[in-house]
Structure formats: C-alpha cells, structure tokens
Image (cartoon, rainbow, N blue to C red):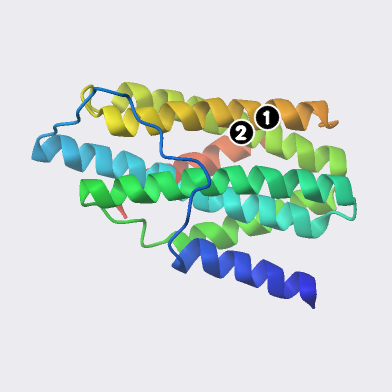
Amino acid sequence: MDAFLSTLDAALRTLFARPRAAQACPTLPGQATELSAAEKAQAGALMRVNHVGEVCAQALYTAQALATRNEALRAHYARASLEETDHLAWTRQRLDELGARPSLLNPLWYAGAFGLGLLAGRLGERVSLGFVVETENQVEAHLQSHLALLPANDHASRAIVAQMKDDEARHALDAKKAGAVELPQAVKGLMRAAAKIMTTVAYRV
C-alpha cells in the first residue's frame, strides 16, 4: 500500500503540481534572448516536446523503482528521477516564459511511459537498466537535434537543452556501469518509432 500511494503521489505531482528544481535553471551569462513571434512559437513547440520527455522520464523511473526488489537499484532510479525533476521544472519554466503550454496529452504520455517502465522492470534488473541506456541515448540524440532546430538567438532554451543533453548522457553511462545489457535492435527500433509518434504529436498538441 505504501508503494502504491508513493507511486500515485509521484504521478499527481508530475502531472498537476508545479515542479521545483534543486538546481538553478541553466543560463548563458550576458546572452539576452530576443525572439520574434514566429521564433517564440517554434521554440515553444520544441520545448513542449522536451517537457513531455521529462514527464515520461518521471514515469519511467517511478515505474522501474516500483518494479525492482533491489534496494540499491531503487535508490539509483530515485537519484536519476530527482535530476529529471530539475529538467521538468526548467522546461516548464521556459514554456511559461515563451507563452506556450504543456502538452494536453501529458496524462496519456505518462501512462504509456509508466507501462513501459513497469514492463522493463519486470524483465529483470539488467534489462531494465538496458532500457534506461537506450532511452537516454535516444533522448540525447533528440536533444542534439533540437540544438539545431531552436532559434539561434534563443539562448535561454539552448542553455537548458545543452545541460539536459549532458545529464542524459551521464544517466546512460551510470546505467551501463550498473550492469545494463544491450537491447536487441528490433526493440531499439520500436522505441524509436514510439518516440517519433510522441514527439510529432506533442509538437502540436
């Protein structure tokens, strides 16, 4: 019952509470951001996608922590989730600054990611960690693409995305060190396809 209530609390906080970051939002000192209306719309759509990614990250880590019986691994997921909370807060803050809204489908994205995380966790510790590695690798590549797509003078968004990219790479490395196995190519392909659908829809809705 305690685990269920804790999991429910995590979901409600992610979806409906204002996230609070433990670390200050990244900035580029001396670089003021001035955007046209079109640039704001483009940046807002991209940051909405990034915010959805952080909603999913909370769901994945919460589900994997729930699934494992290994206390050390549960602590590992909890630490990663805390860092992802910073990302969640930063992207939400940037959305507000851009006058953009979060995805209307965030509860759906959360539920889907939670189900995947729970399934990965049930398949064993090394598979679960392998799922983390592949997820973070794909997120890192996605964030790299956003650095090319964001308006060149949107220094605020670019600073956030760059820091997130570095953090995701570290999460993947930590999971590898913890004993992750490499997932089959077919599974990786399915994960990329699912991510493509999510990012395409979240860009608009």
Task: Identify the residue at horizontal 36%, vertical 56% (top origin).
Answer: 103
Task: Identify the residue at horizontal 44%, vertical 50% (top origin).
Answer: 89
Closer to the chain start, of discs 2 and 1, is 2
Q: Is residue 9 above or below residue 95?
A: below
Q: Tell whether 133 sits left or right of 98.
A: right
Q: Are marks 2 and 1 in contact (CB under 8 Å)?
A: yes
Of 115 and 57, the residue lying toward us:
57
Q: Look at mark 1 in the image and give the residue it sits on.
A: 172
In the rendered image, residue 165, in percent from the top left (x then y), is placed at: 50, 28
Q: Is residue 86 above or below residue 133?
A: below
Q: Quadrant of the C terminus?
A: bottom left
Task: Identify the residue at horizontal 64%, vertical 71% (top origin).
Answer: 8
Badge 2: how crowded within 10 Å, few (<14), some, or many (20+)? many
Q: Is residue 119 visible?
A: yes
In the rendered image, residue 31, in percent from the top left (x then y), is placed at: 23, 23
Q: Look at mark 2 in the image and give the residue it sits on.
A: 136
Disc 1 marks a residue whose amino acid type is Ala
SS label for mark 1: helix
Disc 2 marks a residue whose amino acid type is Glu
Q: Is residue 201 visible?
A: no
Of 181 and 161, the residue lying toward us:
161
Q: Is residue 94 above or below residue 181?
A: below
In the rendered image, residue 171, in percent from the top left (x then y), is placed at: 66, 32
